[in-house]
Structure formats: C-alpha cells, structure tokens
Amino acid sequence: MTAPLTGLGTAALDELLTRASVPGGAFDPAELARLDEAEEFPEVAHRLLVDAGLGAHYVPERHGGLLHGLDGAMAALRTVARRDLTVAIAHGKTFLGAMPTWVAGDDRQTELLSREIRSGAEVCWALTERGTGSDLLAGRLSARPVPGGLALDGEKWLINNATRARFACVLARTRPGGGPRGFRFVLVDKDTLPEGACRTLPKEPTHGIRGADISGIAFQDATVADSAGIGPDGSGFEVLLTSLQLTRICATSLSLGAADHALPIAVRFLTDRHLYGQRLADLPRIRRALGDAASALLLAEAVAVLAGRSAQTLPRELAVTAAVTKAFVPTTVQRSVDALAELLGVRGFLTGVLEHGAFAKLDRDHRIVAVFDGSTAVNRHALITSFPLLARAHAAEVHDAPGLQAAAGLGAPQPPLDPRRLTLISDGGSSVVQSLPEAARLAARRGREDVAADARTLAAESLRLHQEIADAHGASAEAFALAQRYELVFAGAACLALWLHTEPAPGARWWRDALWVRACLTVVLRRLGLEPAAGPDARDLLCAELLRTDLAEGEFSLLSGLETP
C-alpha cells in the first residue's frame, strides 16, 4: 500500500504519479490508452490514488480532512488530470457527491462521511434522470415517508460512479407537486439496503472517458432511516444551488489538467517536426496560433485560480463567480485544444501514434467537462438571471477591495472554506469586474502604461456592457451574447487582479516583464473586438518564451515558481 499523503500533498502527489508513469506503472500512458480503447475502468491507477489517501482532499479540515480551501482540492485534481482525465474524473466525483453533506449535513452525517471517505469510500452524486435533461426540478425519483424512515422509488441515469460507489447522494422529490421546496437530498449507503431494493443500470458507452463508470441506479421501495435525509425537508434545491457554486469551480481543475497535458505535446511536436527546410515552430502562422492558444490557457487558469480562492474571501459573490468560471474555463480550454489539434494535423486524431495517442484521448475526454454540473448554456442562463443585480452593483461603483486582494494575492494565507457563508444571489455584484477602474489606476502607478491602457479599454467596455445588461430582458439570444462578453470582461479583470496583488518570486518565468498578463489581455480584447495597446503582440512574445526551453507538464502555469500554500 502507498504511504498516505500528508499536508497539501500536491508536490508529493506529483512525485508519486511521475514514478507511476513508467512502463508497467499504474499510470503507464500505454496501459491507460489500452484501457481506454477497451472501455475498461482504470482500476490500478484509481487504487493508487485511494491508497495514497487522496480522498482526504475532499473532506473539510473541520471534519478531519485536508480541505482548507478549494484551491487545494483543485491543485490535487489538476495534478491527476494532467496524467489522465478518466482517472481524475472517476476519483474526483466523490468531491461532488459529498458536497451537499458538507453544506447542510448534521454532525453525525459529516462525521460518518468524513470517516468513510478518508478510508477510501466513494460517493456518487445522483442528480439527473432520463428525459429531464438539465431540468432537475422535473426529477421523478421520490422519497416518501414510511414508518421508521424514507422509501425511495425511481431511477437516476448518467451518474458517474453509480455502480462503483458505496454511497449515493440522491436528489429526491419529497412532495408530489415538486417545485423549489419539493426536494431533499438523501445520503444512501447502498451496502445497507436489502436485496432487491437497489439495482445498478448498465454502463453507457461514451465518446470520451470511455473507461469511466457512467451508469445509473434504480431504487424500488428502498427504505433508509430518517437520519439519511440531508437538511430539512424541502431544502434540496437550495442545498443543490449552494453546492454547485463550489463543485462548478472545482470541476474546472479538470480543464486545467487537460491544458497542462495538451500544450507540451503540441510544443514537442512543433519543435521536432521539420517541413520546408525549417521547424514547424519557426513558421510565423504557427507561432501566432500557438501563442494565442497558450495565452488563452493562461487566461482560463487565471479565472479558475481566482475563483477557487474567492470561495473563502468573496463568498457572497460566488453565485456569479461560479457561473462565469464554469461557462468560461472549459470552453476556453477546449478552444485552445482545438487550435492545437489543428497544428498537430492528423497526429492529433490518431490513437496509435504520438505518445500513445495521448492528445486524441485528452481531446475526447475533455469535451464532457463543459457538461458536468451544468452545461455552458445552463451556467450562462444562471449568469443572465443575475443581470439586474450586476447592473445595480456596477452603477454603485463599489467593490470589496479587501476580499478581492485576499483572493488575488497568490501565496497569501486564507481562512478555511465555510459553505455556510455562501448565498444564493450575488447582491454585491462582482468585485472582480467592478474593480476595473481601480486596476487601471494601479497599473499606471506601477509604470506599466501598456497594461494600464488595456485596463482602461476593458473598463470602458465593462461600462458599455453593464448599460446593455441593465436593459436586457429574459433569456434571449441577445442576453446570451451579453453573458459571453461578460465572461471575457471578468477574465480580463481576473488577470489584472492577480497581477496587481501577487508578489512573484524572481524566477517566476511567465511573470517577467508582465508577459503573461499582457498576453492574456490581448486575447480578451481581441475576442471582444477591441484593440490592445500599441506595440509588439504579447502573444508572439509569450510564444517565443514558450519555445525557448523544453517545457515540462505543469510548468506552463501562473503558479509555476510561486510559493503557494
């Protein structure tokens, strides 16, 4: 058995997975590719993570685990995802399935689940049903009161780990009429149910994550104790919305891991491949495409990292932050993966060449991340419902400066994550976006007029956008277009906040000469149809630095070279 991880564990986890990636190891790329082709669960790799105690990262500190903040759990999942997304998605599902218990469970429930997860138990999150899509309030699985407990009837479908997991956190209808107050979460220990009360549904074939246990579960008069209910009756939808604020942000760590894997594959190919008497990496068109894709990956990382830290210091704004992050990060990473695939040509699609077909696999696997915990459209709709609050808060010209500085100061200590501080609406708007005028002033004081000019351009766009948001009505096509623009404005503002409030170490490669933030702001402004500050295109400068030395997986990151807790 592998020695359990201690402390944050990310460095130790990375070392463990590096050792396990040799031929014949648990994370041997050739073996993982074989399992994927055979649609078999990666049991050995998954067992390595269980034995190493990775589940402790999913349990809050106050319940005996290692989860101090979202950034720690995200770092651990990202480390696994850069090796194999199927394994990361399979193991990380327990983080999602346990969240309603951390949000609304009583002391007995949290103590039980904490102990079981730290001992290796898995928890699935049983939300969706056949024919209901993303409309969770249309769910038919019921939990009716019976003497001594609750009886569950119905099925949940397309549930990650529904067959493998011992525990199922089930969203159940408790009132015939349903509605926002007609549901409750029930934590079911499948091992305690009598024979015939529960059966699993067959694994569904999938385009990506082929070996994952995407199946379902059906209950027939499955009686559980009253104590299995999480929170009071009727609280299910509220607990769900609160839990999703945290799980949506954490899920983007899977996208960051995919980016960590994809970019070095592309860089190695472009630097090794010669055509027309020169390296592919030396062709101007190739360099611009690579620089744009790489800059966008840093942009996605900036949003995910800041969002993860905001859960502790800007909790009352997380309803907006989570929706923006989940809509923006997976789609932005996938856009870059698509661009890199074009640079790879046919080798980006073949499964038997170029590092065991690793790029083709991660491309297939990553596409599902945008669907997890609410699709891109679902999250944009959630953002649209906050438009009136965002417009009023922006007009008030205020933001939570201390909370934003604490979130954006990478390496600075933070208070422990407390889900009880989350709210269902962001009545104060978004401090990230509302700080843009101040960010422009601070950038100018630093002597970076190029960054300040881009910040002023973005602040002016934010003002125009909020004026349009104030006049938006309903979930029209125009409102969805506004939501996409808002995501870009948020992303640019996130970059500025991180750059302004983080003190990088002298050797932090991507921070030198404000390189990363200039490149990211160029991507934001170009995608908004705006002109960045005059001068050399920072995307090209970033590409030149990217190609200057060999690139290890995980090295192309804003966190590389920083001392983070």
Image (spheres, helix red, strand yellow):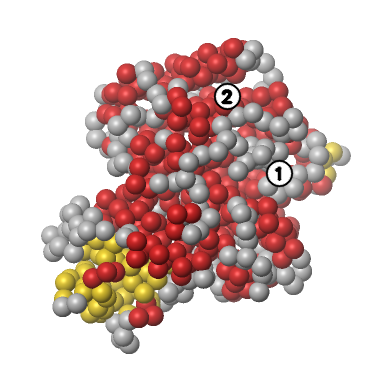
Q: Quadrant of residue 475?
A: top left
- Would residue 326 be found to the left or right of residue 16 on screen? left
What percent of the width, then of the height, locates residue 263?
Answer: 67, 46
Q: In this view, does 42 lie above or below 73?
A: below
Q: Do the residues labelled 1 and 2 touch (CB within 8 Å)?
A: no
Mark seen at residue 555: 1
Mark seen at residue 471: none
Residue at 35% in and 42% down: 421
Q: How far apart are marks 1 and 2 (CA)?
A: 22 Å
Residue at 61% in and 54% down: 7
Q: Which amino acid does label 2 sit on?
A: Leu
Q: Is residue 319 above or below residue 371?
A: above
Residue at 35% in and 65% down: 109
Pick whichever, 377 or 17, lies toward us: 17
Circle 2 Cα neighbour tier, 10 Å, few/some/many (<14 / 14–19 / ≥20): some
Residue at 62% in and 24% down: 518
Q: Which residue lies furthest to the right in this view?
A: 277
Q: In this view, does 428 lie above or below 300?
A: above
Q: In which quarter of the image is residue 175?
A: bottom left
- Would residue 30 be found to the left or right of residue 219 on screen? right
Q: Which amino acid does label 1 sit on?
A: Glu
Label total for image: 2
Determine which residue is flagged by label 2: 500
Find numbered disc 2 in the image and state the secondary structure of the residue it sits on: helix
What percent of the width, then of the height, locates residue 497?
Answer: 53, 27
**Residue 138 in view (yes/no):** no
Quadrant containing the N terminus in the rendered view: bottom right
Find numbered disc 1 in the image and state the secondary structure of the residue it sits on: loop
What percent of the width, then of the height, locates residue 166?
Answer: 42, 74
**Residue 238 in view (yes/no):** yes
